[in-house]
Image (cartoon, grey):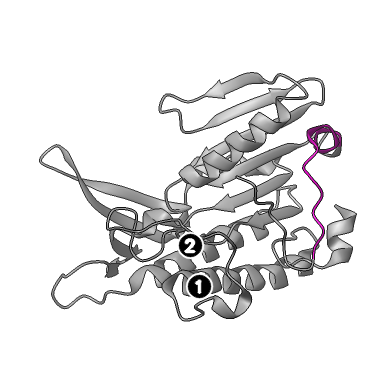
Amino acid sequence: MNWRWKPHECVLLRFDPQIFLEFVRGKKLAFIGDSLARNHMESLLCFLSKVETPIDHYEDSEDRKRIWYFPGHEFTLMILWTKFLVNGEERVINGSSSGIFDLHPHKVDEKWTNDIPAIDYIIISDVHWFFRTIYLHNDTGVIGCVYCDTPNMTDYGVGFALGVAFRSALNHINRCENCKARVILVRTFSPAHFENGTWDSGGRCNRTRPLREKEINLSSNDWGLRSLQMEEVEKANVEGKKKGKICSIGCDEGNADET
């Protein structure tokens, strides 16, 4: 409870909601992704509500898409909920959920893409839904899977599915001709805080200090997934900077200052 987040080689001042609202006056900011993205939106909403009470502008029937509006600053905050960033549907077997998903990595999810032309700032956070049994499709049919034991089918693993989904999402934003967003941030995979076991197998959060750099396990699955996301981000940066309209994680100081 007494820790303060201090990024490496960066002096980060305490968040000031008044300054933030002035910075985003007249803009729209969207968190895109799963429940962690929603948690971040709600956290920001709580901070900003100390300065101005927002209007609950929109809520869909499943409470997935939410839009809040701060009239005094003409600022819109929203969560665009999506499981995989790309098209993915759960199989229904005998009228019940199966926990098995069919994923189309080459097709982005319209649940969020329909809204992005009007958004100024995009924050993407999405990983945990990929830890399920998934069958990967292209236009001709099933090409492989994740967490499956289907005979004569290649299990490509979580990393492959995650990488192609992020590639599709970032490419779509980069190539969106009527999108005005210049800043796209990607929140990379966050490892579990439990040590000596998982949350349900004896794991505990007993750490009294952050890991030092030399203590990080660079061969861990958590680090590997983060690295895969960073590879896709860097590829998107190269394409985006050619068009002068996208600055994702890793943007240089010049671009950051301009925005």
SS of the residue under disc 2? loop
Residue 39 in percent (x, y) is at 53, 40
Name the one closer to the observer, 111 or 247.
Answer: 247
Residue 222 in percent (x, y) is at 46, 69
Q: Say if the magenta span includes residue 66.
A: no
Residue pictured at 27% horizontal, 58% vertical = 201
Q: Is residue 58 above or below residue 122?
A: above
- Which amino acid type is marked by label 1? Trp
- Which amino acid type is marked by label 2? Pro
Q: Is residue 10 above or below residue 12?
A: below
Magenta segment: 10-22
Verify CB contact (< 8 Å) between mark 1 and mark 2: yes
Q: Which residue is mark 2?
A: 191
Taking 190 as reference, is 100 left or right? left
Q: Would you identify the image quadrant in which residue 242 lies? A: bottom right
Q: Which mark is residue 223?
A: 1
Residue 46 in percent (x, y) is at 65, 30
Q: Earlier in the sequence, mark 1 or mark 2?
A: 2
Q: Which mark is residue 45?
A: none
For the N terminus, the image quarter is top right
Residue pictured at 66% horizontal, 72% vertical = 234
Residue pictured at 70% horizontal, 31% vertical = 76
Taking 167 as reference, is 134 left or right? left
Marker count (numbered):
2
Few, some or many residues within 10 Å of mark 1 (<14, 14–19, 20+):
some
